[in-house]
Amino acid sequence: MKKSIFSLFIVVALASCNDLDLEPAGTITKQQFFQTDADALAALNGVYQALTYSEGEQALYGRNLYFLTDMGSDYAAAGSSASNYHVQSISRLAIEASNDRVALAWKQIYNGINRANIAIDNIPGITGGDPALRERLVNEAKFIRALLYFNVVRLWGDAPLVLHEAEELKNEALKVGRTSQEEIYAQIIRDLSDAQALPATYAATDAGRPTGGAAKALLADVYLTRKEWGKARETAQDLVTHAALYGYQLEEEFGDLFTKPDKKNGPEHVFSIQFENGQSGATGNTGNTLATVSYFGTVPIEPADIPASDEIGYSRFVDNGTILDTRRDVSYVKQRVTGVDASGQPVVYTFPRALFIKYVSDLAKPYTQRAGDPVNFPLIRYSEVLLILAEALNEENNGPTAAAYEAINQVRRRAFGQLPYTSPAAKPGVDLGGLSREAFRKAIQDERLFEFVQEGKRWFDLVRWGILVEEVSKVEFKSAVSEKNYLYPIPQEQRDLNPEGLWQNPGY
């Protein structure tokens, strides 16, 4: 009997499930495993695990994707504690095909895709039990597959489109060449269209699973990326119109979104990557490690993940003494009170540069004890749906409409502490108005920079707007940036397996 790739997946992804009676690797087949609804649920857990766990490495959404999506942009950089040469290379935009972080992201993403494929192919074959549950689980897997392929097509362009598990471990069966971006996007849209049938909400026991609203929000982002303004506007507007159906609204306090366990999966979280307490494990390299590597406290050691400069991040936030963009002090810290002196006056420590603190739940807690904090990674928030709507309306109508202003101003009102909203006169300078198409586009670009610090958006945004080289080249030590950086290289180790089918992106 041929050994199935699925047997390897079962051992790696599901060995911790106590209710499964697993046979040794090499003897478990798909037919033997997919027997009950409990098996289907366990398979979906394995799909989600591909996002949050990577043995001995940074998890995909724990930190590894951050290297490409934030550190490879203008506002984030590698600090002196980032000892990996490949991380430093991404920070400088001096990226080669041999970069091990790029290679790891490729493997992690396609591992997740393979797990989703297995679930999608095999769950429908289970009989008895609850067919509605199994249909829901398949659509959850389609959501994850669409999310991962959305990463693939933006990071690498044309890429392998694999929709089923390889039936055998033979070189020819595993040599899949690059598929056009159009075909990949068509599959993403099909998967997300199916996933819109997911429930609008879940009971507390299933909180954190993708909903039909999450599928719609991700689809709006797909259309925005493709510059299909009308479809992006229509999809985002439908979510805003029916926000109550999905339970969506902005949190009144921006800081409540990131470090408070009782606010996890709250009304602004359209879909978040779920991390639990202690998930980082013994190695400290799995789970969400962004808090651990971003803020060391007042020790004279530079963290591994740092802002590229105060000018691009911290100092750009509005603070005129009477009106402050509250997102600044949630995302960054420049000064910290460390005690009081003999006269009772506060002792203030000023950092050489502002540091990231968005995911730090307790500034006084030593960074060595923060690896297991149960901090989720927000993939899509309702504020992004509003900004997608505003951007699409501006581009579709050759200038901002009243609805576009209302969408962006909702985000700004929360940022400036004006929720619940009273009137524009309450805090002058918050609501935007009277802007040209170009000025409104710039306002959207600024708003997304302020809103999504360390949320994996910036590189994608700069590429989508076509201003990556322009903006990144403003950072002196990132001067190696060039047009080639609009895509990442196909990992050399993958090309070595299939050099003809996996041709290299230009410039690498």
Image (cartoon, helix red, strand yellow):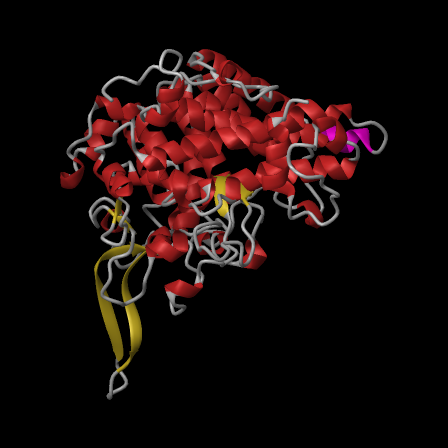
Quadrant for the C terminus, please. top left
Residue shown at 23% from the left, 34% from the top: 93
Q: Nearer the viewer, residue 28 or 256?
A: 28
Kindly tell me whether residue 256 is visible in this rendering: yes
Give x and y (percent) for residue 97: 29, 27
Kindly tell me whether residue 236 is visible in this rendering: no
Furthest-bottom residue in this view:
342
- In the rendered structure, which segment of residues is drawn in magenta? 130-135
Give x and y (percent) for residue 386: 47, 35
Residue shown at 53% from the left, 58% from the top: 278
Residue shown at 24% from the left, 69% from the top: 349
Q: Quadrant of residue 141?
A: top right
Give x and y (percent) for residue 498: 40, 16
Q: Decide whether residue 4 is among the magenta residues.
A: no
In the displayed structure image, the side of residue 201 where residue 146 appears, left or right: left
Quadrant for the N terminus, please. top right
In the displayed structure image, the side of residue 40 where residue 381 appears, left or right: left
Q: How many marks?
A: 0
Q: Quadrant of residue 177?
A: top left
Q: Would you place residue 358 above or below residue 180 in this image?
A: below
- Main SS of residues in magenta: helix
Residue shown at 52% from the left, 31% from the top: 111
Q: Would you place residue 49 above or below residue 493 in this image?
A: below
In the displayed structure image, the side of residue 73 where residue 144 appears, left or right: right
Q: Nearer the viewer, residue 123 or 358?
A: 123
Give x and y (percent) for residue 91: 25, 40
